[in-house]
Structures are given as structure tokens and as C-alpha cells.
Image: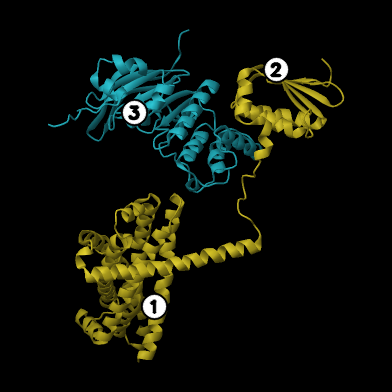
Chain colours: A yellow, B cyan
Amino acid sequence: MKSNEHSSAHYEISDRGDRVIAVRFRGNIDVDTASAIHKSLFPLLSDRNPSKLVIDLEAVTAFDDYGALILAELKHLVPEGKDAFEVINAKNQSKEVLYQVDFETLEKCAVSIKSKRSVHLLVNLGETTLSQLSTIRLMVAFLGSVFLAFTKVIMNPKSLRMDDTIGYMEDTGVHALPIVAMISFLLGLIIAFMSSMQLKQFGANIYVASLVALAMVSELGPIMTAIIVAGRTGSAYAAEIGTMKISEEVDALFSMGFDPTLFLVVPRMIASIMVVPILTLFSDIFAITGGLVIGVMMLKLSPGAYITQTIDTLTLTEIIWSFAKSIVFATLISWVACLRGFQAQGGAASVGNAATSAVVSSIFLIILFDSIFAVIRSYWG
Amino acid sequence: MEKKVLITVRDLVAKYGENLILDHVSFEVYQGEILFILGGSGCGKTTLIRHMMGLAAPASGQIVIDGVDITRCSDADFQKTLRKIGILFQGSALFGSMSLAENIALPIEEYSGLSSSVINDLVRMKLCRVDLAGFENYRPHELSGGMKKRAGLARALALNPKILFLDEPTAGLDPVTAAEIDALISQINRNSGTTMIVVTHELSSIYGLAKRVIMLDKERKGIIDEGDPYFLKDNSSHPSVRRFFNRQPETIMENGN
């Protein structure tokens, strides 16, 4: 054996001079051995910088596309040209494998697998702008179709799917009550505790009741409830409708002559608009109870005095504002959640995105409209 | 030459809750064959192969794949056996968040030990093999039904499995595309010696590819007949099997009353 020959379990390399190298494969060149062959063979060959490779497949017992892969990689080592790479003594089975993977023309279908999108700044900017514009178009169209569907329901109340609506009311309202109650109670507790630290210094303990009642009824009650509903119900709406969209159920509805908005969106929106104000009311009551616990246990106020002070503080206007806010929030949450659901397209990931963006958009809209309410009130007087 | 048994199903009992689906089913799959599992809707075909693929645990019985009883082997053995199996799901089950190339590269990256530059070439070969070269960067939802099936097949074949399960590979495809898929299946079987278990209703596929079929029955909750489809078509002792192969309805409507 010459010193420049090399052999292993799966191949032997022999140098025929003039940088012509012959590789004789043997045994199984397949899925199980390809990785090992690739790792050991390539350093040996690339060191020799071959100008021509002759591949002998005579002693190969099993050959599959992983074997073809090894050959394809070997082909990259020699300069391009018809004679630089030669496969000899291939059996029929190996030939058929090479034929099936279009070995001869493999280079032609070379497309890079990663980095699909163009990275050009201007192209990205254009694409993003166009997609934002189409989102806005969709939002306007969806707003319109919701209005139309509501008009239909008002003109013809029978077209509302009552059973669905009641089901959604139960889901959105009754099932959310424990978590709303728990959070509001703790929130009332915290507000009362924190404010008492300050008010105690002035001997104004009784005003803890006013603070809790005002803060909860006019601001925190509607907002906290809306955020909980956005997280619980908004995400569920978006995921439900998104799944229906990608599994063509929405198309099926449409083709059967149903208006998908009327069928899917209106019951959800009506359910939310009905129950979120009630949830808000519960939230207020539980928060005030939380404040009462602190007032009685830590500030030694009598329950009667605390409740009287609360009732004296709250005016009807406060409560009506609270209701108005929660109705607006409920409308926003259910509208944007359904919109996000309808925007889903493609696969499972888009449903997840729809649910996430439903929650994020809801919370953004809640805060935005709360500020608008604040501005309106400041002019109201 | 003695045929080597690759899969043995012995006294398999499958239930959904209290609902008995398969009652003591036993059969063998030989190395290198294409076995068809047939039967009317709701007779437990999908249940049977779900058990064979290890996706569901049987109420009782054994499933031995290449010497390993997957119903009671260790986790490591089970994982090893899974590597020998490729599956083409009914809806292709391609991952929607990934491109075709990434779908196929996923198992290769995980198990083959090849470097990523080499994997690109391999993925291209796999796609060439199912005639999808040039579609590397498409997402599954941008493909037609037939293309999805072929892509699913390419992914199932990513690691050149010994055994390939095909759940309704040609359902819902036009005759030409279906014939192409059938040709691909037969080519892979001939070329790589892959053992295949096919669930289908398509008579043309059955007549074209099958040497041996097993026929399940809803009443019997098990195998009612097995053999060569051309033989069973006229000579099965069960009328329901003959009806299946001859495409006859159970009750033939007569004119008048």
C-alpha cells in the first residue's frame, strides 16, 4: 500500500497522480453511516485539493439518499466540469437512487433554505406599510359589518342566536366572577391599607371609606374588570374564531348563507356588553368589602359608619359613569378580540398570535378610552 | 424464501372509554411488503394504526415492532423504535409555522448528526424525490392538497425509516395526483425496501399496489378477511368483503318499490 492511500471501514482512497483521486466505497452508505463518513472523509480529501474524483460504488451493499448526499458533497470539492467527477460501477439500485434525487442536475435547483425575506430596508418599509394599510382596511370593513349585523338584529331580533348568547354570558360573566371577586377584594384591601397609613396621621380615618369607594367605582373597578375579561374572554374569543377561520369553518358558514359576523360576533358582543357592567358592579362591591375589613380591623371604625360614609361619597353620576365605561370597554374587548380571530390565517401559530394580540389590543384600547373618558369628565364639570 | 416478520400484532384490544373498538385482533406484517388495511368507515382502521404507531395504548394485547414490544418496553427502546417509523398523517400534519424545507430538516437536524450546510443539500434531494424541488421556502398553507401530501411523505421519509405508515395517502386527490402518489409509494417500496402499512378506501390504489390486504369489520370488531385483493373480490366468503371490492351498496334500490 502506498503511503498516500487511506482506507477505513467504509471507503478507501487511492491517489492516481496528477491530483486525480479515486474513492472506493464499500458496505452500507446510508442513513446510519453517512454522518460518520462525512466527518472522516472530507478533511482527508480537501487536504489533497483534488482536480478529479473517481467514485467507485462496486462494493456498496446499501445505498440511499444519504449516500447520494455524500456524493453530492464530494462533487463540491472538485472544479465544475463534466470530467472532474465520475461515478463508476454503480449498481442499478444506486443508480436509481441517484436518478430519483436528480443527482446530475441537483445544482440547478439550488435555493438557499433560510432567509426567505428580503432584508432590504426599503422593501421592508414598503411591505410593513402595505400590511398596516390592509389591516386598517380590514378593521374598517369589520366595523362596518358589525354595524350591519347589529342593524339586522335590531330589525329582526329573531336572527340573534339566543342560546349562544346565553352560553357566552355564562362563560364571560358567571365563570369570571370568582376571579373578579378575589382580585377586587384584595385590591380594596390594599387601597384601604395604603391610604390609611397616610390618613391616620391627620386623624381622617373615616375618609378611607370615601377613597376606596371613589377610586374603585370611578376608575379601578371598570378597568380591572375589563382587563380580567380581556385576558379570560378576549383571548378565548380570538382563539375560537381564529381556529374556525383556519379550519375553513368560517368559509363553511359563509357558503351556507350565514353571515359570519351575525353568527359569531354579535352573540359574543351582546353577551359581553350585558355581563361586564354587572361584573364591574360586583367588583366595586367586593372592593368596598375589602376596604371595610381594613377599616374595621385596623382603623377601629364601626361597619355602620364605614358604609354610611361610602354611600354619602358615591353619587348617582359616579355610578352611571362606571356603567358607561364598562359598557364601552366590553364593546371594545369583544370587538377587537373577534377582529383578531378573523385576521388569523395559516397555521396553529396564527391562532396563538391572534389570542395574544387580542389581549394586547384590548388592554391598549381600555387605557386609551379611559383617558378619553377622563378628558370628557374634566370638561363635564 | 422465508418472509421475515417485522411487525406482530397479537390479541390487540382497543377501547375508547367503555366503547370496544377492536376485539382481539392479531396479524403480522412482513418485511418489505405493502400491507393495506381496509374496511368501512368507523370500523377502527385509524384506531388500529394509531396503536401500531404508539400514539395510543391498547387495553390489552401486544404490538411487536422489529423485536420490541412497544406496549411494555422501556422509554429508551420505545424512542428507538419510533425512529424506525415514518408516518404520513391524513392531513399531512406539516408544521404551519415552518417552511417546507424546515419541516423536513427538523428530524434530520435532530437525529442524523450531519452539519447544517450538508442538511440543506439533503433536504433538496428529499424534495426532488417527491417532485417538489423549488418549493423549499413555501409555507404549508401555500400548497395544494397533493403537494402537501408529497411534502408530508418527504418528511416521513426524512430519516429513511424501515416502516412507513400512510393514513389515507390519496384521499381527496384527483385521479392523476393520486396515481402519482401511488407510483411514488411503489417506487420507494421497491427502491428502499421500506415496509408500508397503508390505510385507504381508494380501490384503484388497492388494485394497483396491494398484494395483501386485511379487512376490518365493524360488527366483528376485528379482521374479517385477508389476502390478495383480486382473489377476495370474487372469492371471499364474506358478502360484505365482496361488496367492498365491487363497490356495491348494502341494499340495492330497485325501481318501483
Label 1 secondary element? helix
Marks 2/1: CA–CA distance: 80 Å
In terms of depth relative to the viewer, which is nearer, A72 or A12?
Answer: A72
Q: Position of residue B214 (x, y in %)?
A: 34, 21
Q: Are marks 1 and 3 in contact (CB under 8 Å)?
A: no
Q: Are marks 3 and 2 on the same chain?
A: no
Quadrant of the image occupied by residue A35? top right
- Which residue is most to the left? B257
Quadrant of the image occupied by residue B198? top left
Q: What chain letter is assigned to the residue under label 1?
A: A
Label 3 secondary element? helix
In this rendering, would A332 be left or right of A45? left
Q: Earlier in the sequence, mark 2 or mark 1?
A: 2
Residue kind at label 2, given as amino acid type = Asn
**Residue at (20, 62) in percent of width and height:** A162
**Picture layout, residue A318 above or below residue B204:** below
| Number of residue marks | 3
Q: Are marks 2 and 1 in contact (CB under 8 Å)?
A: no
Decide if residue B72 is in sight here.
no
Q: Which residue is mark 3?
A: B48
Quadrant of the image occupied by residue B127? top right
In terms of depth relative to the viewer, which is nearer, B171 or B248?
Answer: B248
Considering the image in quadrants, where does the N terminus of chain A appear?
A: top right
Q: Which residue is mark 1?
A: A370
Residue kind at label 3, given as amino acid type = Leu
In this rendering, would A29 be left or right of B70? right
Q: Position of residue A321 (x, y in %)?
A: 30, 81
Q: What chain letter is assigned to the residue under label 3?
A: B
Q: Which residue is mark 2?
A: A89
**Residue at (39, 26) in percent of width and height:** B204
In terms of depth relative to the viewer, which is nearer, A309 or A278?
Answer: A278
